[in-house]
Amino acid sequence: METEDFVYRRKERVALVAIVVVASLAVACLLVAFSYYCYIRNKLSKRHNPHKKDKYEEKGSFENLQVATEKGLQVFTFKQLHSATGGFSKSNVVGHGGFGSVYRGVLNDGRKVAVKFMDQAGKQGEDEFKMEVELLSRLHSPYLLALLGYCSDNNHKLLVYEFMANGGLQEHLYPINGHNDVNLRLDWETRLRIALEAAKGLEYLHEHVSPPVIHRDFKSSNILLDKNFHAKVSDFGLAKLGPDKAGGHVSTRVLGTQGYIAPEYALTGHLTTKSDVYSYGVVLLELLTGRVPVDMKRPPGEGVLVNWVLPCLTDREKVVQIMDPALESQYSMKEVIQVAAIAAMCVQPEADYRPLMADVVQSLVPLVKTHRPTSKVGSYSSFSVPRSPSQDSGRAST
């Protein structure tokens, strides 16, 4: 009897162990299945819910770059920049914008600089300040305005750039204070060189940086000229990192300057490098015509530059009629036709029909007689950070 009882208890223990093992395996399988389910769900939610990603990027964009930024740029005190600009004297103001004012300055070591005093009102200035510091510390090209340093002292936010003696392109294209002295306007060869160098700046941003950088506010006033009238692209406060995938887009609020914004971006908020190409095309039209992008004081049909000139750009006789009078007898018709054709492609309503900036550069190179000593486009840069570095607050939209 005892033996039967012992055998029974032994079988009971074996059964209990078997039950425990099976139960443990079942629980383990459930945990694995649940973990896999969570992984798949998380992946799908990231793919189908871009707003979630935007919130993360708005809160944490570029925070991990702070150390690298401080190593690459000089950090100034407010006192240093106050002294360099003569106490931010009105006589040293060289520009204005939605951000505040830009002052001419001289540092203690004798370097001439431009100091941008960011407007303290609201979040706009803060976002643009962060964008410029964190982006320009990583971009290096002879066709981009160099950021030398910054100041964030007692709520004062200032950016310090290399000094560009001849200011913005816009100032040289249009009469100031009603004076229309054509002898002071840019000649044809200089305009061609500026067009090429500005194109090289955008080419660097679009094709030599990974992921590409979309300027989002490319315009004539953001093309600065040095003492020899060489051009550099400036003002990256509204810039965005573009998509990794060719042909992709990033969705964002429509910000920029009226007259330069690509139609598909204005309608959908879908931003691509081709949005910059459209803006570049508008600048080319400014160089050809000497007219601002939007001027509703013009005769009917001529108020919006793109709408007025687009039908004329491929007609040899009509192109002459839209040319800036200040350029009379300076250009060959062959050059004008080529530049007009490039501009026409850049401002096509359909983004897919617009060229890459690399193609624009290749088309302009043979037309430019004088080049910079360096032929380099700029060093390659790669961003291992969230793709959308600036928040979507900034200048007024159209």
Image (cartoon, rainbow, N blue to C red):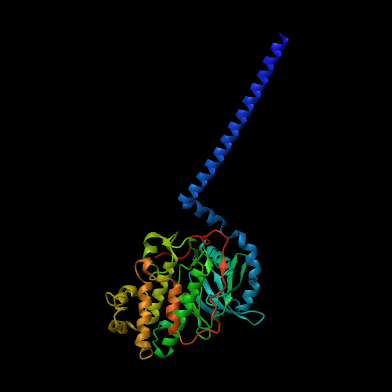
> Is 214 placed above or below 286 here?
above
> Is 333 placed above or below 142 here?
below
Please give the name of the residue rendered at 36% of the width and 91% of the height, measured from the top-left corner. Answer: 329
Please give the name of the residue rendered at 57% of the width and 68% of the height, measured from the top-left corner. Answer: 381
Residue 266 spot, x, y in % from top left? 38, 63
> Is 158 placed above or below 183 here?
above
Residue 152 spot, x, y in % from top left? 62, 66
Please give the name of the residue rendered at 63% of the width and 81% of the height, measured from the top-left corner. Answer: 111
Q: How many marks?
A: 0
Q: Is residue 129 visible?
A: yes
Asked whether, in this view, residue 311 is left or right of residue 366, the answer is: left
> Is 130 placed above or below 101 here?
above
Which residue, as the protein is rendered here, is positioned at the far top? 1
Q: Is residue 289 visible?
A: no
Camera-side residue of 11 and 175: 11
Residue 236 spot, x, y in % from top left? 51, 69
Camera-side residue of 230 and 150: 230
Which residue, as the protein is rendered here, is positioned at the far left? 300
- Figure quadrant of the C terminus: bottom left
Asked whether, in this view, residue 249 is left or right of residue 375, the answer is: left
Residue 75 spot, x, y in % from top left? 65, 70
- Figure quadrant of the N terminus: top right
Camera-side residue of 14 and 264: 14
Q: Which quadrant of the view contains residue 2?
A: top right
